[in-house]
Amino acid sequence: MKKKPSNPVYKKYTFYGSLQLEEQSIPVLQQRHAEWVRKMKWNNKTPLEELALICSEVGEACNECRGDRPTEHLAEELADIVLRVLSMASGQGIQLVSVIVAKIEKNELRGNRGRIK
């Protein structure tokens, strides 16, 4: 059995599934989450409804940052945002890895575009 990473962020969370953290990837997570959403019959939202749900999760993450420091719940709210994005991408037939890689490359080619470094 593989050992979990020693990073303290991971120590807070219990992994219940058969996959180890090292075996997770965006496509694996996207597929896994899409199957769960279909099983729950929550895959009937319009793109605008999906975006509204993403915004609501962003609002919840903002609430976790109202004090001097983010609360211990920020990580989970960020995960909720990512899950909503994965759900929307799956519903739209978007394979996020290829889009993310293309966007990173596009951003790198742009440089700072006049922004102050």
Image (tube, rainbow, N blue to C red):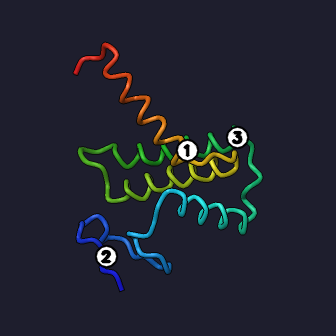
Q: Position of residue 88 (x, y in %)?
A: 64, 47
* Marks 2 & 1, CB-CB < 8 Å contact: no
Counting residues from the N terminus, which is met first, the one under dot 2 or under dot 1?
A: 2
Residue 14: quadrant of the picture: bottom left
Q: Earlier in the sequence, mark 3 or mark 2?
A: 2
Which element carries disc 2, helix, strand or loop? loop
Of 92 and 111, which appears nearest the observer?
A: 111
Q: Position of 46 compared to 71: left or right?
A: right
Counting every numbered tag in the picture gives 3
Q: Judging from the image, what secondary structure is the residue with disc 3 in? A: helix
Image height of 60 relative to 111, above or below = below
Residue in view at x 74 percent, y 48 percent: 45
Residue of label 3: 47
Relative horizontal placement of residue 59, taking residue 49 as reference (left or right): left
Given the image, on which type of amino acid does mark 2 rest?
A: Lys
Q: Which residue is mark 2?
A: 4
Q: CA distance from mark 1 to mark 3?
A: 14 Å
Instruction: Find residue 20 and report its image quarter.
Output: bottom left
Say what amino acid the circle numbered 1 marks. Answer: Ser
Disc 1: which residue: 56
Q: Position of residue 111 (x, y in %)?
A: 32, 22
Image quadrant for the C terminus?
Answer: top left
- Disc 1 element: helix
Q: CA distance from mark 3 to mark 2?
A: 36 Å
Q: Amino acid at mark 3?
A: Pro
Residue at 28 percent of width and 71 percent of height: 5
Label annotation for residue 69: none
Q: Nearer the viewer, mark 2 or mark 1?
A: 2
